[in-house]
Amino acid sequence: MQVTVIGLGPMGQAMTAAYLDKGYDVTVWNRTPAKAAALVARGARLAPSVAAALRAGDLVVMSLTDYDAVHAILEQAPEALAGRTVANLTSDTPERARAEAEWIAAHGGVQLTGGVQTPPPGIGAPGAETYYSGDAAALETHRAALEVLTGIDYLGEDPGLAALYYQIGMDMFWTGLTGYLHGQALASAHGIPAERFLEQAVKTMNFEYFARFYAPRIDAGDHAGDVDNVTMAVASLEHVVHTAQAAGLDTGVPGAVLAAFRRAQAAGHGGDSLTRLTETLKG
């Protein structure tokens, strides 16, 4: 029932609070100690140094901006990593995750790479999950403590897998969310409030049917245009761009999507399914 949390941004704050709610003995460290004040008032202990924070227990949870920030902290006390498991829930590339795991292992520790699939308010709430990859034995040792934060989706021993899955998800998330925001900007330009269009937006952004329909075809390399095709998408996107232009909106977002479909069309794939873009976008 002991854990160390390093980094007290919104995610670190939420994680520390979740542990305190469950009665854990929590040690915290942050480059700006003042951020720990409210948590210390609730019972957390503020470590005077990185070394002290690492030595406080066997499990260290980190959620920072990137791996540069992680490394800048850990390299202050590499000798204190021996025997510790670092649940590194920081966003970065798969390559950086593997490199940091090797560095931590060289100093006697173990890294569990994580990709959290919820914003801070979802920490400790039912239904939230985190991708994990790395040492399976370390994961099982600390499973109960990690499940205080979210459910666990374990992907395998490769420490880069969780980072890869996370970045794939972020690719979809940012693209999709930007599409929503651009669409709502178009709605707002015509006097339609976000709350008024909310139910339509939720229905439109539900891609489950398409993902389930397309996935086996993508894996089979089957891009037959029997249901949809690239030329149809080009025509539809041109209508979107023209509608946005007429409303005085920036058309960079739909314009970029249109450009991708036009490249597929120019390459002779106008009659193929939209899934052809999984090949076209490889460059």
Image: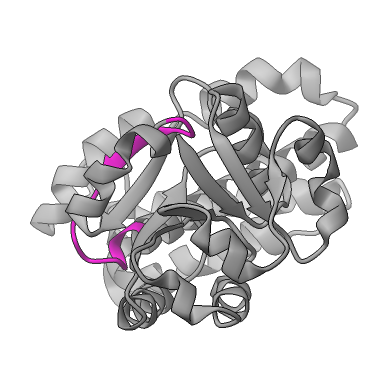
All told, the count of numbered labels is: 0
Q: Nearer the viewer, residue 169 or 28?
A: 28
Answer whether residue 173 is visible to the viewer in this image.
yes
Does 173 lie within the magenta span? no
Above or below residue 169? Residue 160 is below
Q: Residue at x 37, y 69 (%)?
A: 264
Above or below residue 178? Residue 66 is below
Q: Position of residue 282 (x, y in %)?
A: 33, 76
Q: In the image, which residues are magenta?
A: 148-162
Q: Quadrant of the C terminus?
A: bottom left
Does 151 lie within the magenta span? yes
Q: Residue at x 64, y 65 (%)?
A: 65
Q: Residue at x 66, y 40 (%)?
A: 180
Q: Position of residue 147 (x, y in %)?
A: 39, 32
Dividing the picture into quadrants, the one containing residue 243 is top right
Q: Nearer the viewer, residue 244 or 116?
A: 116
Q: Quadrant of the N terminus?
A: top left
Q: Position of residue 216 (x, y in %)?
A: 14, 44
Answer whether residue 224 is visible to the viewer in this image.
no
Q: Nearer the viewer, residue 109 or 56?
A: 56
Say left or right for 238 vs 117: right
